[in-house]
Structures are given as C-alpha cells and as structure tokens.
Amino acid sequence: MAENAVRDALASFVAERDWAQFHSPENLAKSISIEAGELLECFQWSSAADPDRVTDELADVLTYCLLLADRMGLDADTIVLDKLERTRAKYPVDKARGRSTRYDQL
C-alpha cells in the first residue's frame, strides 16, 4: 500500500461527506476517547475479546487519531517517531529490559 494511502482515503471519505466542519481538534479528541472506551469495553468481562470487534474499535481509534494529527498539521509518523526517541532516552535498554518500572524509578 502506498505510504499515504490510508490518510488519502480518510481525507477523501471526509471530503465526500463534508464532515471536516465537525472535526475540530476538541471534537476529534473527544471521539478518540469515546472510541478508546469502546475498545476497552471489548475486554470488560473477559480477556478473550471478539477479534472482529477489537479490529473495528481499534480502526475507529486510529482513524480519529490520524484525523486529529492531520487537522493539527502534524505528520503522524513523525510525531510517533519523535516520541519514541524521547521515550527511548527515558527507558534505556540496560535498565528497562523486561521491566515495567516507571522511568523515574529505574
């Protein structure tokens, strides 16, 4: 799949429906939280969640995240890689490998 195929498909989908008018950063952030709650609900009573439902809810979370990044003029790949670098510095392999300890407790 082309590098920006997903983002292009999302932009086209939103444009065809004239939905960008509803996509303020605030509304998109709310939607991310709502969809994340629905993803979590898949695991509410059992760790054996329905894979199809998890897939759908995860797609919704990712969709709103990509839409928010775009609305704010951010490149999703860049912000994830930048954050990974900052997190890498907080959690050096020699101290963090195999541990879930918070960075300030390592």
Image (cartoon, grey):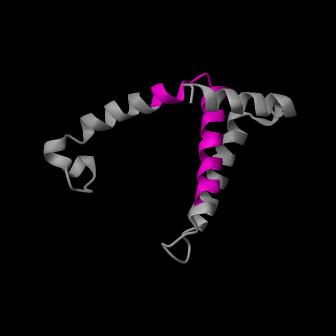
Determine which quarter of the picture holds residue 35.
bottom right
| Percent coordinates x, y for residue 63 in the rendering | 64, 41
Name the residue at the right extreme: 17
Determine which quarter of the picture holds residue 44.
bottom right
Residue at the (62%, 28%) spot, across then down:
5
Name the residue at the top extreme: 73
Residue at the (20%, 48%) spot, across then down:
96
Q: What span is colored magenta in the figure?
A: 54-79
Name the residue at the left extreme: 94
Residue at the (63%, 55%) spot, across then down:
57
Q: Is residue 61 magenta?
A: yes
| Percent coordinates x, y for residue 26 in the rendering | 69, 39
Q: Is residue 41 magenta?
A: no
Judge left or right: residue 88 versus residue 83.
left
Residue 86 versus residue 36 in the image, above or below: above
Residue at the (69%, 47%) spot, across then down:
31
| Percent coordinates x, y for residue 24 in the rendering | 73, 33
Determine which quarter of the picture holds residue 45.
bottom right
Q: Main secondary structure of the magenta part?
A: helix
Tally of marks: 0
Judge left or right: residue 17 versus residue 34.
right
Q: Front-most of 46 and 96?
A: 46
Q: Quadrant of the N terminus?
A: top right
Name the residue at the bottom extreme: 45
| Percent coordinates x, y for residue 101 in the rendering | 25, 55
Q: Front-most of 43 and 51?
A: 51
